[in-house]
Image: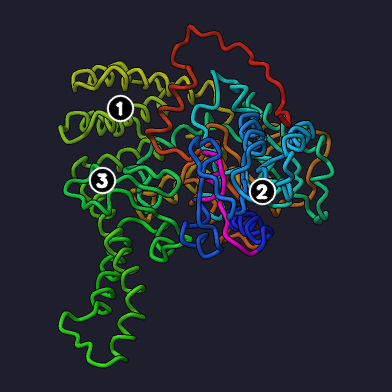
Amino acid sequence: MNVVFAVKQYVSKMIEDSGPGMKVLLMDKETTGIVSMVYTQSEILQKEVYLFERIDSQNREIMKHLKAICFLRPTKENVDYLIQELRRPKYSIYFIYFSNVISKSDVKSLAEADEQEVVAEVQEFYGDYIAVNPHLFSLSILGCCQGRNWDPAQLSRTTQGLTALLLSLKKCPMIRYQLSSEAAKRLAECVKQVITKEYELFEFRRTEVPPLLLILDRCDDAITPLLNQWTYQAMVHELLGINNNRIDLSRVPGISKDLREVVLSAENDEFYANNMYLNFAEIGSNIKNLMEDFQKKKPKEQQKLESIADMKAFVENYPQFKKMSGTVSKHVTVVGELSRLVSERNLLEVSEVEQELACQNDHSSALQNVKRLLQNPKVTEFDAARLVMLYALHYERHSSNSLPGLMMDLRNKGVSEKYRKLVSAVVEYGGKRVRGSDLFSPKDAVAITKQFLKGLKGVENVYTQHQPFVHETLDQLIKGKLKENVYPYLGPSTLRDRPQDIIVFIIGGATYEEALTVYNLNRTTPGVRIVLGGTTVHNTKSFLEEVLASGLHSRSRESSQVTSRSASRR
């Protein structure tokens, strides 16, 4: 179950099926992102694709010597663009691939427009999601719900993305969902409707144990996306932001022109692939080793290129040297900027208190530490508000709750009203009233003993003691102990055996910390394969935007039930 491989295979097949000759790849805004995550431009160039164009770009030239490979989402807008294109074709022949199920009426409209008979084939290739890591996918949707219910357009897009994922991995799953979430139940029903309607597409070879789709809601764990991160990929997203593998470094003091935007992709960057899940301290020493290795391979200034053989060796090694040079300067810049932000924003101290708020139950110590940090001028308004949000979520119903005092401290610190309002919005979004599970206190004697022992021997790293709630959920699921009254099955049948292939989807967005959890579970649990997805992949900033977009902070809005059509084939 490798989502990067699944999408990559689709793209390769499209290009191969069009045969030899020069080609143009015609995409829309979303499919451009989908393809760029699994292939670099230079890799595609090697496959005779010499031009990349957007279907919505008005001023494309007529190039009859090129074949067109069209990879598009099956939206009304894209079908209209294609109809216009086929009436006045710019290329010699068209191979059309839709990233999801396309309706018969749309295919008929395309056939009618193809008067010049330039269309060679029309197919459905289900690469309708962003493949982030082999076990992590996203739909790049920010703000999927209105109140507690789906925005109808986003429900439709999410249903399409999730069913495409199942088709691309060739899975017809049983479905479980989080009972406390109306949105999770609604999505489960919509996915089930598509599977029933398109039953012929979902007729895969039956496995002994059926795959399982588990649908969760971000509201159940608002703690994870609020924490600072200390593993490489998660930390880069938290402090710099990753957008389709691209990192914007234009704000870095004294940055050189060619490093204003860099790409971090485990597919094409060995150092990143080996270090993305390691913690920050290890990255530092690995960067040092990379530098030393680079220094050894660096061509000597005085290297004499006397013979033809010398020149040949230099030219042969130069591309590898240049690539290594690019990798070194990129990672040194990224890690240098992370270090600068950590010290400028006092993040080691901030993170230690965040972890205490997330993992321990000592109210007076937590309150004292939060108050102390709010007085610290190095702590930014963003981090100050984040600490108060974590306090508000954990000690929401504590008898000595001191939230009003902390809110006053935020005001005295000069924290803007936008952030102060977000404190109550986050509690409204993911507070005790809406959670289907208990995030903070251990559930039974075994868990209490575990926590006590952990406290005795201390944790390996004070900054990474937190485990996302999805870790416990998956652990229970793998052991066959996940409670059916909390996570019921959709429909009458249930799994008798422990699940082997699990797809977890989080409405409201997943995080890189949860992706790390899934990566570790895949590594340490033989016979179990897990893929994690979310409407998006959050850092704290985007999570707070998600909370704002839900509109839950304005309590005056009635949380009326949003009725919506199930995802139609459009």
Task: Name the amino acid type tagged 2.
Answer: Tyr
Q: Name the quadrant containing residue 297.
A: bottom left
Foreground mark, 2 or 1, reads 2
Horizontal and vertical percent position of residue 76:
65, 29
**How many discs mark residues in the rendered view?**
3
Report whether residue 445 is seen: no
**Disc 3, disc 2: CB below 8 Å?**
no
Task: Indicate left or right for 113 with 253 as reference.
Answer: right
> Looking at this view, is 438 or 98 the one in front?
98
Which disc is residue 94 wearing? 2
Which disc is residue 385 wearing? 1
Q: Name the quadrant containing residue 541.
A: top left
Q: Secondary structure at mark 1?
A: helix
Residue 93 located within the stretch drawn in magenta: no
Report whether residue 333 is seen: yes
The residue singled out by tag 3 in the image is 348
Foreground mark, 3 or 2, reads 2
Horizontal and vertical percent position of residue 26:
57, 46
Residue 194 drawn above or below residue 343? above
Task: Name the amino acid type tagged 1.
Answer: Ala
Q: Magenta residues, as a range?
A: 20-35
Residue at the (70%, 32%) spot, across then down: 188
- Mark 1 or mark 3, earlier in chain: 3
Task: Indicate left or right for 279 with 70 as reference.
Answer: left
Mark 2 to mark 1 CA distance (whole Å): 54 Å
